[in-house]
Amino acid sequence: MKICPKCGGKDFSTGYSFQNSIATIDFTGDEFIFTPESGNETKERKICTCLNCGAHFDLTDEATRQSFIHQLKECKTCGNKVPEEELDENGVCIVCRLKEADPSFANIESITTDFNMIRMMASLRMDNLKLSKDNEKLKKEIELSKVVQEKIDNASTEATEKSEEQVTEEPKKRGRKKKPVEGEIVREEQQNNVVDVDQQSTTVDNDIQIDENVAPEMPQEVVDLQNAMNPPEEV
């Protein structure tokens, strides 16, 4: 809210007017008549009047506009008048805010009596504090990002090593032995009972050796039976 630059009042009356640069004035009856001349330039004027002190202000004048735009207002803490943009949302000036942020500047007024100089020093110090705070925040964010990146790298390395171990050390899968059906069992038993005759004969021959020059002696009963079955032919 803007205040009166002279008394600090907050209430105004406002109005608009049109100004002719060249005009003639006549009076007819009870009225004045303004007649613009050639080359006339009409300008709009915005006027405000302080209801407290009665001061008039032409808001179309640039100097007057600036006196309203960049007004000095009292700090609610110290009472000094400072530009409105230097006050925070609580109406506290930058000097008082610096004293709270950095107690070492509690007696900053003892440096000089020029309050404008004190405001400048307070502004520079507050900027440095803000910069230091931002740098500290950035430093913490960088350190945190390094920790996170290190954890990601470690997790990736562990996953890679685990994958390689599984590839090199994974035991061969053993398949289940197929259960033979009934027909296959029979064929397997038959194959187990087959005897190689040639191989058996060879084995027997190798075990029994007969001398061709020595005839085995036949029992008498066998000889008699043989003679009975083969009687001698009659002549």
Image: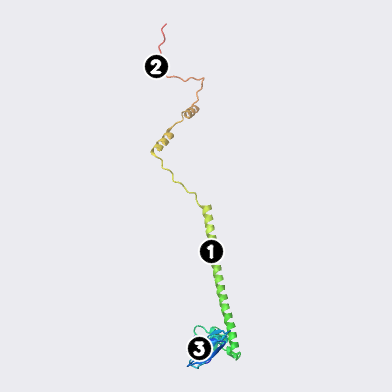
Residue 168's spot in the image, x, y percent?
53, 52
Residue at the extreme front of the image, as rendered: 28
Which quadrant of the figure has residue 118?
Answer: bottom right
The residue closer to the viewer here, 126 or 148, is 126
Q: Is residue 112 left or right of residue 189?
A: right
Q: Position of residue 183 (x, y in %)?
A: 39, 37
Other residues around mark 3 within 10 Å, as few (<14) / some (14–19) / many (≥20):
some
Question: Which marked residue is nearer to the observer: mark 2 or mark 3?
Answer: 3
Percent of width and height locating residue 116: 59, 88
Determine the CA span between mark 2 and mark 3. 170 Å
Closest to the camera, between mark 1 and mark 2, is: 1
- Vertical placement of residue 111 versus 221, above or below: below
Q: Residue at x 39, y 40 (%)?
A: 181
Observer-nearest of 68 and 95: 68
Residue indicated by mark 2: 225
Q: Tag 3: residue type?
A: Cys
Earlier-in-chain disc, 2 versus 3: 3
Quarter occupied by the C terminus: top left
Query: Could you tell me which secondary element the residue under label 1 belongs to?
Result: helix
User: Residue placed at 52% from the left, 59% from the top?
Assistant: 159
Q: For the residues labelled 2 and 3, say whether their Cβ atoms are less than 8 Å apart.
A: no
Residue in view at x 41 percent, y 18 percent: 222
Q: Which mark is residue 152?
A: 1
The residue type indicated by label 2 comes to Leu
- Would you name the residue on which mark 3 appears? 48
Q: Amino acid at mark 1?
A: Ile
Q: Nearer the viewer, residue 221 or 125?
A: 125
| Displayed quadrant of residue 123 | bottom right
